[in-house]
Amino acid sequence: MKRSVFILSLISLALIFSCTEEKKKGNQKTSKDLTIKVDTLTFNDTTPLYEGANVGLNMRMHIEWPEDAVSEEALKNMQRNITCLLFDKDLSTTDIEFAMEAYNRKASELYIEVNDGEYDDCSEDSYMTDREEFIEGSFMKPYGDLISYQKYTSGYSGGAHGLDALSYITFDRKTGNVISDSELFKEGYQDRLIESLRANLLFSVKDTDMLFELDILPSDNFYLNEKGITYIYQRYEIGPYYLGIIKVTIPWKEIQDILK
């Protein structure tokens, strides 16, 4: 088994996320206050189906990992929430290398258990037991005190084609806590938000006749930027595979009246 874990130190090229300057009660908050310094870690491991097999599970990861934040508490909260998003709630930890190794070990054991006995060295259908998985985690541009983190996964686990997915969480950079969309809006916001979400779905998908569902609802899978709030719907969730991952953005100007 070949395994490599590389930590790319980006001290001189750290990704600095800063908020715009704002004044509160006469005091100016500088952009330095909410800086997040980020390192990038990569992981590459191939687990053969059995010793000497030419098929196996290839696991690759490319993860942006916060190394410094506004406070130690905010940093640890952020780190635990990121590992929970990337891997599993049981791997909510501040030790990213442990989390990567543990997730790969769990995936490898499951791969061997499911495929054991299904492969013959002489078979021409070796691709049927070859598996691959790629996990990428990255920060998006901040929006005021908030910053979203993206998880992108892709892989092949048999069938006609591979699958990919996008998942997001949004942090309060002052605390490192994950926020829900309900924390962004005033009480009783749901009807207005749903109305705007469904209207913007029609602008987000070219072939709406192919959608399984038009009466969509907001979910916890969203990100924020200067344009608005964007909700994510995975392949097959509200439409066929060929429509891809569907993103529906609600511009801030449309929902100003319900924003806190």
Image (tube, rainbow, N blue to C red):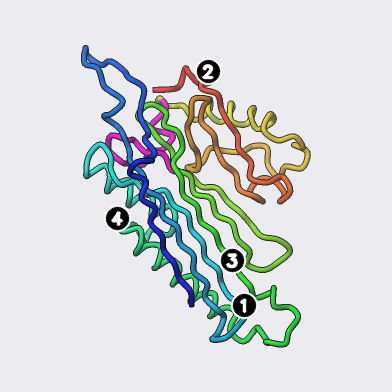
Q: Report how far apart the C-alphas of labels 4 and 2 lie in the structure.
A: 38 Å
Residue plotted at (64% across, 57% down) = 163
Packing grade of label 2 (10 A; few <14, some 14-19, many >=20) is few
The quarter holding residue 128 reads bottom right
Q: Which quarter of the picture shows residue 188?
A: top left
Q: The C terminus lies in which quarter of the figure?
A: top left
Disc 4 crowd rating (10 Å Cα; few below 14, some 14-19, many 20+) is some
- Residue 132 — which label? 3
> In what element is the residue under mark 2?
helix
Q: Nearer the viewer, residue 78 or 214?
A: 78
Q: Are marks 4 and 3 in contact (CB under 8 Å)?
A: no
Q: Are marks 3 and 1 in contact (CB under 8 Å)?
A: no
Counting residues from the start of the chain, the first of labels 4 and 2 encountered is 4
x and y percent of residue 252 in the render? 51, 22
Q: Nearer the viewer, mark 4 or mark 2?
A: 4
Pick whichever of labels 1 and 2 is earlier in the sequence.
1
Highlighted range, magenta: 169-185
Q: Position of residue 160 (x, y in %)?
A: 74, 63
* Residue 36 spot, x, y in % from top left: 33, 38
Q: Which residue is mark 4?
A: 94
Residue at the image position 54 percent from the left and 34 percent from the top:
230
Sequence-first tag of 3 and 1: 1
Write the residue at 41% across / 55% down. 41
Disc 1 to disc 2, how far (Cα)? 52 Å
Please give the residue where the numbered disc 2 appears in the rendered image.
Answer: 253
User: Is residue 171 highlighted in magenta?
Assistant: yes
Q: Is residue 247 above or below residue 7?
A: above
Density class for disc 3 (Cα within 10 Å; few <14, some 14-19, many ≥20) is some
Q: Amino acid at mark 3?
A: Glu
Q: Amino acid at mark 4?
A: Thr
Q: Which residue was labeled with disc 1?
A: 55
